Image (cartoon, rainbow, N blue to C red):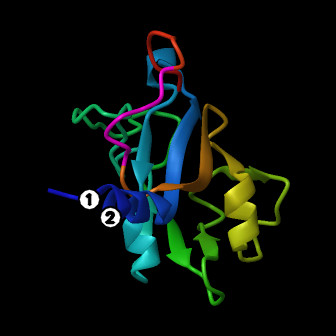
Amino acid sequence: MVSETGERRALDLRVPALTILMHPVTARVGERVLLPSLVSGRPVALSRLTPLFAQPGNAEARALDDVHLSRQPITLAPGERAGSIRIVAEPQSARIEAFGVDLQAELAAADLERGVALLLGGHVALLLHVLPAVEPRHRERYGLVGDSA
């Protein structure tokens, strides 16, 4: 059994994540994927086929799977500075835009804390940001029913 203090420490650990902001299938909005491998120093491929996204608390994960996205992946790689990320894309194969940051430079940890909106193929928007590495077991409901993306 995990103590409340142990759970709180796990919730304090934050990792890079991608959340779907816009998708041709609107029910996909809010799906997300945690990217702990970036914290471990390993790159992550981003394409129409990988990674797999899921609604929070749902085990059914699926790829972005949009024909406007390239099968040739964009690479999210750990940057030189702690908590930073580089986006590596072949100019001829990937259509990617970022809002508020220079894609040629590393995205600093502060950029990820604020969140960076990425537009892929003109049809899918993702938020690159940080989230707790572990989903809390009990969410505060404040008298409300349902979850918001």
- Residue 21: x %, y % from top left: 60, 32
Of 135 and 51, the residue lying toward us: 135
- Residue 8: x %, y % from top left: 41, 58
Per the rendered image, the range of residues in magenta is 135-141
Picture disc at residue 6: 2
User: Badges 1 and 2: C-beta atoms under 8 Å apart?
Assistant: yes
- Residue 140: x %, y % from top left: 47, 29
Residue 140 falls inside the magenta stretch: yes
Picture disc at residue 136: none
Whether residue 25 is situated above or below residue 95 in the rendered picture: above
Residue drawn at 60 percent across, 53 percent down:
128
- Residue 34: x %, y % from top left: 41, 54
- Looking at the rendered structure, the secondary structure element under dot 1 is loop
Would residue 105 appear left or right of 89 to someone viewing this image? right
Residue drawn at 54 percent across, 26 percent down:
23
Of 143 and 134, the residue lying toward us: 143
Mark-to-mark CA distance, 1 and 2 = 5 Å
What type is the residue that disc 1 sits on? Ser
Whether residue 147 is situated above or below residue 63 in the rendered picture: above
Image quarter of residue 53: top left
What type is the residue that disc 2 sits on? Gly
Of 142 and 96, the residue lying toward us: 142
Residue at label 1?
A: 3
